[in-house]
Structures are given as structure tokens and as C-alpha cells.
Amino acid sequence: MNLAQDTGNSGVQKSAIIAQDVHKWYASNNFHVLRGVSMRVNKGEVVVVMGPSGSGKSTFIRTFNALEEYQKGRIEVDGIELSHDLRNIDAIRKEVGMVFQQFNLFPHLSVLQNVTLAPIWVRRWSKKKAETVAIELLERIGIVEQAHKYPGQLSGGQQQRVAIIRALAMQPKIMLFDEPTSALDPEMVREVLDTMRFLAQSGMTMVVVTHEVGFAREVADRIFLMDSGVLVEEGAPQEFFRNPKQERTRRFLEQIL
């Protein structure tokens, strides 16, 4: 099973995500959290979004699968325009996997049951097919021996890898990561990043919110800096880290490098 979906062989890059002039306000305090954000992510591309806490980066990527609503602008995911039509939202969510800071595994279900739950109920797969796909993914990620354990019996790094596998079991075309290593102890970060590197090498389209500089340098095709609800700068890793154009980017990098 190929982890990434076929992007065609026409030689022309196709867009997986198009966001145009996206605005979001929080009604409770009229806070303008996204201020006209635009981004295009090509199929098979790995995009990293960096920025200080409260910059709007997590909110922004959550608009891609309607976990956050936006009030102005346009978002298209895998050729489907995001709207209030629940059919469009459901269609997008079937093609977009997401991994959060917290693992959100069901503690009363085994690893195998956690991974197969959505394919059985959402994709309407048979239990046999779902388990076959789950075991193959567990083998590829290197934790098949944990299949019949429960989340409480796993380390934090193993739980986050299961969360990634659970998203992959739906065979998504796009994967979103919202600071997937921020809740982990430092010694557990590497195994999760190694899993994400494996996905990137397989050709999976990925949008990653992270402060992991080594990962961004090695894996990202492009890096964006976000601050105060706007995208401040965009560039290839070498350009972004070595020769940033904006003073705000330089000040941010001074804090994290």
C-alpha cells in the first residue's frame, strides 16, 4: 500500500490546498485572529508553518478541515471548496488526516482497535480489511508488537505514532500536524519525527506546525513564518534560515536557533 496518493504524471504541480484571503474573528472578544492569510500547498509538498505562540498558525491549519470556521475568504482542499455544506466538509475530512498535540486515543481500546475504528465506521470497510491495513501500517512504522496493548501501556512517543497511524489508516491524501511533538518528553521526540520523515519521503502532502528546526531544515519544501494572524515570510529552508528577508523573521530565528 502506498502511503501517498498518486499525484498524476503530467509533470504539472497540482494544488492540494488553496487558501485565499482567509479571515477569522473570535466573536466572544472580537479578536481578529486570521488577517487575510493566503497559502497554496502543492500535492506531494511538505510545508512547515512556524511562529510564536498565539500567532494563529494552529487556527489556520484547522480551517483546512473545518475544525475552525472562518468568516471571509476561500479555502479549497483536494479540489473541493470548503463551505457550510456538510457534504463538502465530510468529503474533505475523509481525505485529510490530522495529528494533534495530544494523542486523543481511546484508553479502553487496544492499539489495533483505535486504528481500525474510523475505517470501519467512516469508510465502511470490513473488520478484516481494516485490520489488514492497520497491521501493515504498524509494521511499516515499526510498532506492530504494540498492536494488542492499550494506550496506557505505551510511552508518549509510541502513543503519538499510533495517533499518526490512526490518521493514515483512513488513507488520506493530505496530513496536517499541529505541533505533534510539543507534549512529548525530549527523548521521545525523535521517534515521532522519524515517522514524519518516513511519510514525507513517501510523497505524502503534509502541512506541519512545529518549532522543530532540524526537521524543518531537512524535510520541508517551504517554510512559512506566521505572526499576529498574517504570513510574514515564505522561503525554502536554506533561504529561510540563512537569509531571511524580514526583520520579524530574523528576530524569531534569534529566539529559536
Image (tube, grey):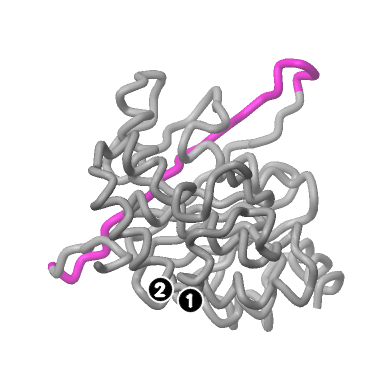
The structure residue drawn at horizontal position 47% and vertical position 40%, both measured from the top left corner, is: 64
Instruction: Say if 224 sits above or below 178 in the image.
Output: below
Secondary element under disc 2, as helix, strand or loop, is helix
Q: Which residue is mark 1?
A: 142
Three-letter residue code for mark 2: Glu
Residue 63 coordinates in the image, percent (x, y)? 52, 36
The structure residue drawn at horizontal position 55% and vertical position 27%, both measured from the top left corner, is: 70
Instruction: Say if 96 sits above or below 1 in the image.
Output: above
The structure residue drawn at horizontal position 26% and vertical position 61%, both measured from the top left corner, is: 5
Q: Quadrant of residue 26?
A: top right
124 relative to 177 in the view: left or right: left
Q: Residue furthest right?
A: 255
Secondary element under disc 1, as helix, strand or loop, is loop
Circles 2 and 1: CB atoms closer than 8 Å: yes
Q: Residue furthest front?
A: 148
Indicate the quadrant containing the N terminus: top left, top right, bottom left or bottom right: bottom left
185 relative to 49 in the view: left or right: right
Three-letter residue code for mark 1: Gly
Residue 134 coordinates in the image, percent (x, y)? 37, 59
Q: Which residue is mark 2?
A: 139
153 relative to 92 in the view: left or right: right
Q: Is residue 249 magenta?
A: no
Indicate the quadrant containing the C terminus: top left, top right, bottom left or bottom right: bottom right
132 relative to 117 in the view: left or right: left
Q: Quadrant of residue 199?
A: bottom left
Write down the region rendered in magenta: 10-30
Distance in Å between CA atoms under marks 2 and 1: 5 Å
Q: Which mark is residue 3?
A: none
Residue 231 coordinates in the image, percent (x, y)? 63, 52
